[in-house]
Image: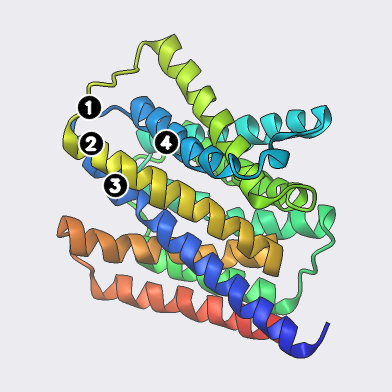
């Protein structure tokens, strides 16, 4: 492929990964607004993923051929949805209950390193010096933004956050593998529907489903569905196709930067100078990785 074509793919892939990071960065703010509106966690997750699934399946109406999956492919999707996406969310939310949220996020964001290792083994993506440097610099940025969180680091919470990083890494690499066989729209349609059904089963089992949500909660859930899920899933799938799973994962470390900015703008939370410094480290690490990868 001509160099110009490669450059275009690099730029588009990086842009889509950054867009996914921004979309994911809305999650914390929208979730807080939904909870403040009276919705519980499982209700939020059920409505979020079913609303997203309705969007993806609505688009599939115009491409009926995309509905059909071979049985092994469907089983792989179910395993990836339940054991990857759904389990990651549950583990992370459990860790939030056991240890400070900042500590959980810090531990969770080792997942780009997990992706790099798994992608090298399963997808034959190269782990070079630039990738390692970018991982170190972006994680240092996260450490600066979050600090060393005070509080009780309960072993169960630490283990849950680390397992969430592992399952999320497996999900991203599994997604990259599946996208070699499936169109992104088909993958996302099945993924959101399966994850939504999983959370619905848990909500019914625990008696947590409460659809009588306030307007504020509904609007916040709509943001979670359309921005944090539909936009993020679509952008991430495109990014992985252009630049691979490990590079997309590193660029997605921009997510806490976007979260911090949006929290300041929408929730009035202060953005401290040290957080700006940490964000600068993350941006530098992402740019380092991107420029080196484009060479």
Q: Position of residue 69 (x, y in %)?
A: 76, 34
Mark 2 Cα-neighbour bin, 10 Å: few <14, some 14–19, many ≥20: many
Badges 2 and 1: C-beta atoms under 8 Å apart?
yes
Q: Position of residue 114 (x, y in %)?
A: 67, 54
- Against 273, residue 120 (above or below) is above
Report the residue that reaches farthest toward the left. 268
Does dot 4 land on a helix, a strand or a loop? helix
* 3 vs 4, front mark: 4
Q: How far apart are marks 4 and 2 (CA)?
A: 14 Å
Does dot 1 land on a helix, a strand or a loop? loop
Query: Residue at point 52% right, 23% down?
Result: 197
Q: Can residue 103 be seen in this view?
A: no
- Against 57, residue 109 (above or below) is below
Task: Answer with mark 4 or mark 1, whichever residue precedes in sequence.
Answer: 4
* 4 vs 2, front mark: 4
Q: Where is residue 28 in the image (x, y as percent from the top left)?
A: 33, 49
Q: Distance between the residues labelled 2 and 1?
A: 6 Å
Does dot 2 land on a helix, a strand or a loop? helix
User: Which one is in front, 115 or 42?
Assistant: 42
Query: Residue at point 62% right, 56% down?
Result: 237
Q: Residue 239 carries which label?
A: none
* 3 vs 1, front mark: 1
Does dot 3 land on a helix, a strand or a loop? helix
Residue where numbered disc 4 is placed: 51
Q: Where is residue 192 in the image (x, y as percent from the top left)?
A: 54, 37
Q: Residue 217 carries which label?
A: 2
């Amino acid at each position: 492929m001509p160099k110009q074509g490669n450059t275009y793919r690099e730029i588009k892939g990086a842009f889509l990964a950054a867009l996914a990071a921004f979309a994911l960065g809305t999650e914390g703010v929208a979730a807080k607004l939904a909870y403040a509106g009276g919705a519980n966690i499982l209700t939020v997750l059920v409505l979020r993923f079913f609303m997203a699934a309705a969007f993806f399946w609505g688009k599939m109406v115009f491409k009926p051929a995309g509905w059909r999956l071979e049985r092994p492919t469907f089983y792989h999707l179910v395993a990836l949805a339940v054991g990857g996406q759904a389990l990651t969310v549950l583990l992370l939310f459990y860790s939030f209950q056991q240890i400070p949220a900042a500590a959980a996020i810090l531990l969770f964001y080792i997942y780009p390193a997990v992706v790099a290792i798994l992608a090298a083994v399963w997808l034959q993506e190269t782990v070079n010096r630039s990738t390692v440097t970018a991982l170190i610099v972006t994680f240092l940025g996260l450490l600066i933004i979050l600090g060393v969180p005070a509080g009780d680091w309960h072993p169960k919470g630490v283990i849950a956050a680390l397992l969430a990083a592992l399952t999320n890494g497996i999900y991203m690499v599994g997604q990259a593998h599946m996208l070699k066989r499936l169109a992104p729209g088909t993958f996302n349609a099945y993924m959101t529907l399966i994850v939504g059904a999983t959370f619905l089963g848990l909500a019914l089992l625990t008696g947590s489903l409460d659809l009588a949500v306030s307007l504020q909660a509904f609007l916040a859930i709509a943001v979670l569905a359309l921005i944090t899920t539909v936009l993020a899933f679509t952008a991430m799938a495109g990014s992985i196709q252009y630049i691979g799973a490990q590079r997309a994962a590193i660029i997605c470390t921009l997510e806490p930067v976007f979260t911090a900015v949006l929290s300041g703008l929408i929730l009035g939370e202060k953005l401290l100078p040290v957080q700006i410094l940490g964000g600068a480290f993350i941006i530098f690490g992402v740019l380092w990785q991107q420029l080196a990868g484009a060479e």
